[in-house]
Image (cartoon, grey):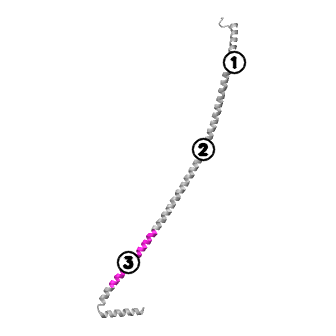
């Protein structure tokens, strides 16, 4: 039974050795261990603070990015609107110019047609006059083959001239 019951001398030496080990640990190991734990706690706290600051900074950057994106969208919409208006204006101007050119062409064609019509009428008049003269010449030659007929005609023309 000697193994189960502690011997008072052994207990005494165990307490003294435990106290010495505790003093040695306290003097040489406890402070460095506590300092390391304190440094580790501070580094963890600093890392958490840095993470919080980084999270806040990221949130600020997100807000800035969203603001920039909204502004870019507004600018894009304004540019697109301006481009559509410019396109509509250019198309309207092109249509107006085409209408003007078409009207000028139509007016020019009408003038050409009118001048050609007048020229054709003049040509027809000249041909009718020439034909009339030729017909009259042939009739006169036929009718005036005789000298009495010639005298009657000259007298008739003279009478007509005197009346007018």
Q: Position of residue 49 (x, y in %)?
A: 65, 33
Residue 156 belongs to magenta span: no
Secondary structure type for disc 2: helix
| Crowd around label 3: few <14 · some 14–19 · many ≥20 (10 Å) | few
Report which quarter residue 59 is drawn in.
Answer: top right
Instruction: Determine whether label 1 and label 3 are within 8 Å by CB.
Output: no
Other-residue count near label 1 (Cα within 10 Å), few / some / many at <14 / 14–19 / ≥20:
few
Residue under the point 38% across and 77% down: 123
Left or right position of 15 against 64: right
Q: Nearer the viewer, mark 1 or mark 3?
A: 1
**Quadrant that contains the C terminus:** bottom left
Question: Compared to 155, does 34 lie above or below?
Answer: above
Residue hosting label 1: 27
- The x and y percentages for residue 150 are 32, 92
- Residue depicted at x 30% and y 89%: 143
In the displayed structure, would residue 142 be above or below residue 47? below
Q: Position of residue 48 (x, y in %)?
A: 64, 32
Q: Name the residue carrying label 3.
A: 123
Front residue of this view, candidates 132 and 36: 36
Dominant SS type (magenta): helix
* Callout 1 secondary element: helix
Whichever of callouts 2 and 3 sits on the residue coming sooner in the sequence is 2
160 and 31: which one is in front?
31
For the record, the magenta segment spans 106-135
Helix, strand or loop under label 3:
helix
């Amino acid at each position: 039974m000697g193994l189960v019951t502690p011997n008072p001398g052994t207990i005494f030496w165990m307490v003294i050795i435990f106290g010495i080990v505790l003093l040695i640990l306290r003097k040489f190991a406890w402070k460095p261990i506590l300092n390391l734990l304190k440094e580790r706690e501070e580094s963890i706290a600093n890392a958490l603070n840095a993470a919080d600051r980084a999270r806040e900074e990221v949130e600020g950057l997100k807000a800035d990015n969203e603001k920039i994106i909204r502004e870019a969208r507004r600018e894009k919409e304004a540019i697109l609107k301006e481009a559509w208006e410019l396109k509509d204006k250019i198309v309207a101007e092109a249509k107006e110019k085409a209408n003007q050119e078409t009207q000028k062409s139509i007016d020019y064609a009408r003038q050409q047609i009118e001048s050609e019509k007048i020229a054709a009428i003049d040509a027809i008049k000249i041909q009718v006059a020439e034909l009339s003269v030729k017909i009259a010449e042939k009739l006169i030659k036929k009718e005036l083959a005789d000298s009495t007929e010639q005298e009657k005609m000259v007298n008739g023309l003279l009478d007509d001239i005197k009346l007018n």
